[in-house]
Amino acid sequence: MEPGVTGPDWHAGRAFGAGADGDARTGPGGSSMPHVPTPGPPPPDASRRHTVAPTATGPGALRRRGYVTPPEIQWFPASRWPSLSTASTTRQNMVSMNDVRLRQLGSTSLRVSPLCLGGNVFGWTADEHTSFRILDAYTAAGGNFVDTADSYSAWVEGNQGGESETVIGRWLASRGRPSDMVIATKVSQHPDFRGLSASNVRAAAKASLERLGGETIDLYYAHFDDPDTPLAESAEAFSQLVEEGVVRHVGLSNHSPGRIRAWLDVCEERGLHAPVCVQPLYNLVERGIEDDLVPLARERGLALLPYFGLARGFLTGKYRPGSAEVDSPRAGKARAYLDAPRGRRVLDALDAVADRDGVSQAAVALSWLVDRPSVVSVLASARDPEQLADLLPVNHLRLDEESAALLTRSTDPEPSETS
């Protein structure tokens, strides 16, 4: 059991968190804990009702500040809550699970939250204890979609790969898996399982399941293209895993539009289980996929699940001209966005929308992204619950047309930038 948990009875429909100093509270009798209402059947008008905590700058401000409330809400059954034993949060803007409207992932039966929690930090910048707190807070706030890869985090000295999957597997074992939880992982970059050959894909899937502690991978990505393996071999291997029930659905990540189209064509010709989604690099300041991949996704019915939605942290607003250095392994690349004219324009636009609506710049940037054509959910990671608190509003807020247009214009290229 995670440190700070007093016993198995402290989980029935409650969540406790951390104070301003970040110290975890240790039980129902501890000092002030943000209360998450115990869920139950929705009220008669639940399909049109959007209730959030009445805070000045958090989700409670949404009703007052120009956001468009989703017309229908996906209500979560109370039966899911007992599996969430200790949800940690650090702010009173935590929302209840009833606030999240789940989205259909492409043509599948999977329904996922708009915010997909990136697991790349688990076992890297977030140790196991902190990772558990992040996962607790994310699921207690209605999130049901966690993304990882078998290679996370092999780049860290002393790691071998699979650390993130292992942390997630231990968390699932300690909490009990919520019935609607969707776990995505990837193959091709683990030091022991490189590439997309049929034998490697099968062996890597088995290893991932052992770490995650499950019987089926909900969404299995080909992490990077493998030009040394015939595409038909890879497509057959993934499809066979679906046939055997090892994998529910297939996705592609870091493949060019041409290769994605070719993979889809092979599947159509051979009657294989085709990829249902693509995970591309896409955000407010990197919009290149709008010219090629987005049209392909719309044509072939693919869901887009962008990563680097915050542009390595730049779109959080932490990186400013003359600002202090940020303690992050991505700080150098994030600060580089300031060199382009659109970098400063987008910061001004983010500030305007965030200040007006009382949310973080990160939430604004991701909310813009999640409503782009074909986008179903956006990936973002947090190395502690404090960072996560700034991301959680993405699960229920939607920018109005004026705000979305302002952000889009801020990163539309000027004539001088395209000449």
Image (cartoon, rainbow, N blue to C red):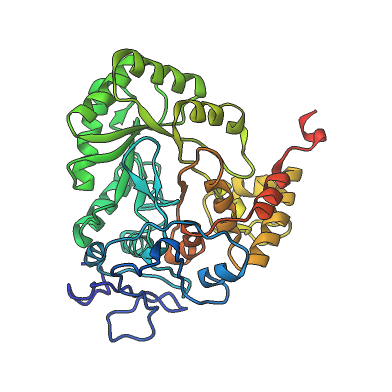
Q: Residue at x 61, y 51 (%)?
A: 314
Q: Position of residue 273 (x, y in %)?
A: 29, 25
* Above or below 321: residue 336: above
* Above or below 13: residue 195: above
Q: Residue at x 22, y 24 (%)?
A: 240
Asked if residue 358 lies left or right of residue 175, the reply is right
Closest to the observer, 221 or 78: 78
Asked if residue 219 lies left or right of residue 356, the reply is left
Classify the position of the C terminus by image quarter: top right
Q: Is residue 4 visible?
A: yes
Q: Residue at x 44, y 70 (%)?
A: 94
Q: Position of residue 91 (x, y in %)?
A: 47, 73
Asked if residue 299 lies left or right of residue 249, the reply is right
Q: Position of residue 224 (x, y in %)?
A: 41, 29
Q: Position of residue 338 (x, y in %)?
A: 70, 48
Residue 215 quadrant: top left
Residue 155 quadrant: top left
Closest to the observer, 116 or 382: 116
Q: Is residue 227 visible?
A: no
Classify the position of the N terminus by image quarter: bottom left
* Above or below 81: residue 257: above
Closest to the observer, 88 or 73: 73
Closest to the observer, 151 or 35: 35
